[in-house]
């Protein structure tokens, strides 16, 4: 199946492998904007336990580029913003 | 047994990234070793090495009922291309082709084909092995192994513990066997 486009002011987040198993979904549409470093907290609200059980071993991409969440968190308000139409993905271990 | 992840084709035919002498592709269809070989043939080649990765019926002696691959298709293609280009440069290859199959791959069939051509055989042997290891380590493709009692997401590195497909919260006996195997 193909992933539908997000509604206005939303991004798409894609789940793969163990992340799909945990969320029982292939994708969500999340309201934007938010700092990418907040992603784990945003997902934890929807899927309690996901941070420690899944995200801790996963990488994150935004529009096909890998993002270092710790580095982004250190930048505070200068960190990368996820904006409308962006494609974010949770990448479990390969 | 139903998978938690759709294993039906998400696109028809083949999705590929190509440039002269570099060809990478993903497909849900059975792979053809001859077609992959043909992509790297050249009059200046003295050697072609073709690697075929095939699906095994067991994991640590436990029978596997079926096996499926899923991928983040656009990113996997981009990473495959980067691995192919780096391998071609490092070993001065004439050409390189990598095709990975997605979805359910019946036991005994090919899940990945890598073909490399070079003027002399030594470089082709080395490049083929190095390329496969990088594909397993870096490309955004996940293997789901199904046993009679459920499925496991298997990391591509040999012997690394898997994550149970249905419930990631508790360890399966399978996973613990996997962990013992790496110690």
Image (cartoon, rainbow, N blue to C red):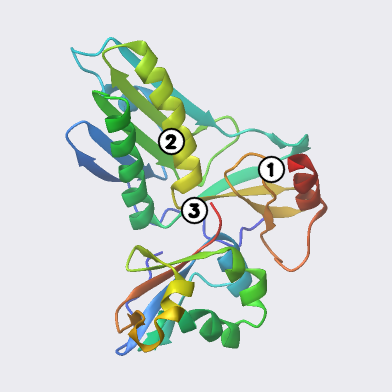
Marks 2 and 3, Cα distance to the nearest angstrom? 15 Å
Q: Nearer the viewer, residue B157 or B172?
A: B157
Question: Where's residue B63, x and y in %?
Answer: 75, 38
- Relative placement, left or right, of B173 versus B1 is right
Q: Which residue does the numbered mark 2 point to in the structure image?
A: B30
N-terminal-most mark, 3 or 1: 1
| Chain containing mark 2 | B
Marks 3 and 1, Cα distance to the nearest angstrom? 17 Å
Question: Where's residue A39, x and y in %?
Answer: 48, 80
Secondary structure under the numbered disc 1 in the rendered image: loop
- The quadrant in which residue A12 appears is bottom left
**Circle on res. B65:** 1
Q: Which residue is located at x 38 percent, y 44 percent?
A: B27
- Relative placement, left or right, of A20 versus A71 is right
| Depicted B121 relative to depicted A24: above or below | above
Q: Which residue does the numbered mark 3 point to in the structure image?
A: B70
Marks 1 and 2, Cα distance to the nearest angstrom? 18 Å
Q: Characterize the local packing of mark 2: few (<14), some (14-19) or many (20 or more) Cα atoms within 10 angstroms.
A: some
Question: Where's residue B105, x and y in %?
Answer: 53, 40
Q: Which residue is located at x 44 percent, y 68 percent?
A: A68
Labels 1 and 2 in the same subunit = yes
**Visible residue check, residue B112:** no
Q: Characterize the local packing of mark 1: few (<14), some (14-19) or many (20 or more) Cα atoms within 10 angstroms.
A: some
Q: Are marks 3 and 1 in contact (CB under 8 Å)?
A: no
Between circles 2 and 3, the one closer to the viewer is 3
Q: Which residue is located at x 76 percent, y 52 percent?
A: B175
């Amino acid at each position: 199946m193909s992933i539908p486009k997000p509604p206005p002011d939303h991004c798409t987040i894609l789940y793969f492998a163990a992340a799909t198993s945990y969320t029982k979904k292939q994708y969500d549409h999340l309201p934007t904007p938010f700092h990418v470093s907040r992603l784990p907290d945003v997902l934890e609200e929807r899927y309690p336990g996901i941070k420690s059980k899944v995200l801790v071993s996963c990488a994150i991409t935004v529009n096909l580029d890998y993002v270092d969440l710790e580095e982004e968190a250190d930048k505070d308000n200068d960190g990368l913003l996820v904006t409308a139409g962006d494609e974010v993905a949770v990448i479990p271990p390969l | 047994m139903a998978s938690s992840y759709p294993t039906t084709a998400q696109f028809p035919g083949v999705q590929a990234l190509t440039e002269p002498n570099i060809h990478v592709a993903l497909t849900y269809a059975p792979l053809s070793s001859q077609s992959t070989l043909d992509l790297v043939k050249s009059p200046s080649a003295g050697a072609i090495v073709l690697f075929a990765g095939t699906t095994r019926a067991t994991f640590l002696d436990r029978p596997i009922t079926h096996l499926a691959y899923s991928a983040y298709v656009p990113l996997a293609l981009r990473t495959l291309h980067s691995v192919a280009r780096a391998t071609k440069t490092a070993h001065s290859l004439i050409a390189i082709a990598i095709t990975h199959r997605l979805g359910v791959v019946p036991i005994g069939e090919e899940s990945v084909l890598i073909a490399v051509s070079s003027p002399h055989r030594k470089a082709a042997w080395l490049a083929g092995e190095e390329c496969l290891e990088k594909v397993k380590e870096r490309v955004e493709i996940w293997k789901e192994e199904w046993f009679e009692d459920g499925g496991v997401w298997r990391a591509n590195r040999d012997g690394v513990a898997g994550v149970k497909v249905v419930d990631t919260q508790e360890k399966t006996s399978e996973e613990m066997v996997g962990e013992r195997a790496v110690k």
